[in-house]
Each structure stands twice: as C-alpha cells, then as structure tokens.
Image: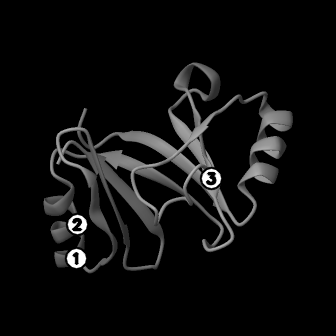
C-alpha cells in the first residue's frame, strides 16, 4: 500500500482539549498513549483514533512544546529514501527518519510551497 494516505494527525498545544473537541464533534474515541517520536507529541499525550471510528487511522496529540498543525502521512517502503527524494525535488526535510525500524518509522518534509507532509513505513 505504498504511496497512499495511511494516517492523519491533529496536533496542538492542548491535546486533551483537542481530543474533547473532536470527540464531541465527530464521536471519536481515543486510546491515549505515546507516539513513535517525541517530536510528534509529548509523552502520554497522543490519542490514537482507529479507522473504524474515523474512516482512517489517525491521532490527536501534542503538548505545550509543539506548534499546532494538521497533517497526513503517506505510506512508503523506505522513509529515508522518500525524504531524500522529497529534498531532490525541492522540498525540505523537517523530521526523520525516526521510530522503530521494522515496526514504524516516520518522517516529515515541507513541499516547495511550505506545506508539511508526513511519510511512514517499516524502515
């Protein structure tokens, strides 16, 4: 399933407030815990939303040290290679690769217009 949108994130400085907001708005429920990278969400502040609830796997998290953003992740076979390619095409690497190889690795880049995009995969 490479090159398909596989995950979304809504990140803010008050993740509990955001989880309550989207829970009330859309009926989302969360499994709150950690994420694969402290640069994505502070420890214990990431609320996973299952695809059966939101239509796609996602998460709502963040913390006081993080800036608000909404982004999606595209599934790739090799996060490092995808980030290298993004840079070759005029993008800028922001994060990664970070995570647990063989399980989940993530990265983020900005496109030539400055839009933040995520990539995720097994390596």
Q: Secondary structure at mark 1?
A: helix
Quarter of the image for residue 48 reads top right
Mark 3 neighbour density, 10 Å: few (under 14) some (14–19) many (20 or more): many
Q: Residue at x 25, y 44 (%)?
A: 121
SS under mark 2: helix
Q: CA distance from mark 1 to mark 3?
A: 27 Å
* Residue at x 57%, y 26% (from the top left corner): 55
Q: Residue at x 16, y 44 (%)?
A: 77
- Counting the numbered discs, the total is 3
Q: Which residue is mark 2?
A: 83
Dots 1, 3 in contact, CB < 8 A: no
Q: Percent position (x, y) of residue 14?
A: 75, 61
Q: Earlier in the sequence, mark 1 or mark 3?
A: 3
Residue 67 in the image: above or below residue 74: below
Of residues 39 and 11, the one drawn nearer to the viewer in this rendering: 39
CB of mark 1 within 8 Å of CB of mark 2? yes
- Callout 2 crowding tier (Cα within 10 Å): few <14, some 14–19, many ≥20: many
Q: Residue at x 68, y 63 (%)?
A: 12
What number is the disc on residue 87?
Answer: 1
Residue 65 percent location from the top left of the image: 62, 74
In this picture, residue 119 sits left or right of residue 16: left
Q: Using the rendered view, name the quadrant where residue 37 is placed.
A: bottom left
Q: Which mark is residue 7?
A: none
Q: Residues within 10 Å of mark 1 (few under 14, many from 20)?
A: some
Marks 2/3 in contact by CB < 8 Å: the verdict is: no
Secondary structure state at the residue bearing disc 3: strand
Task: Measure the alpha-carbon separation of dots 2 and 3.
Answer: 23 Å
Dot placed on the residue nearer the N-terminal end, 2 or 3? 3
Residue 61's label in the rendered image is 3
């Amino acid at each position: 399933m490479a090159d398909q949108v596989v995950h979304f994130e809504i990140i803010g400085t008050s993740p509990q407030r955001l989880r309550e907001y989207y829970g009330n708005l859309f009926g989302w429920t969360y499994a709150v815990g950690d994420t694969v990278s402290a640069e994505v969400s502070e420890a214990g502040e990431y609320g996973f939303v299952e695809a059966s609830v939101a239509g796609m796997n996602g998460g709502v998290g963040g913390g006081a040290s993080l800036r608000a953003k909404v982004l999606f992740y595209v599934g790739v076979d090799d996060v490092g290679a995808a980030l290298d390619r993004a840079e070759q095409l005029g993008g800028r690497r922001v994060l990664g690769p970070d995570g647990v190889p063989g399980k989940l690795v993530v990265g983020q880049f900005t496109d030539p217009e400055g839009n933040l995009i995520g990539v995720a995969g097994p390596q």
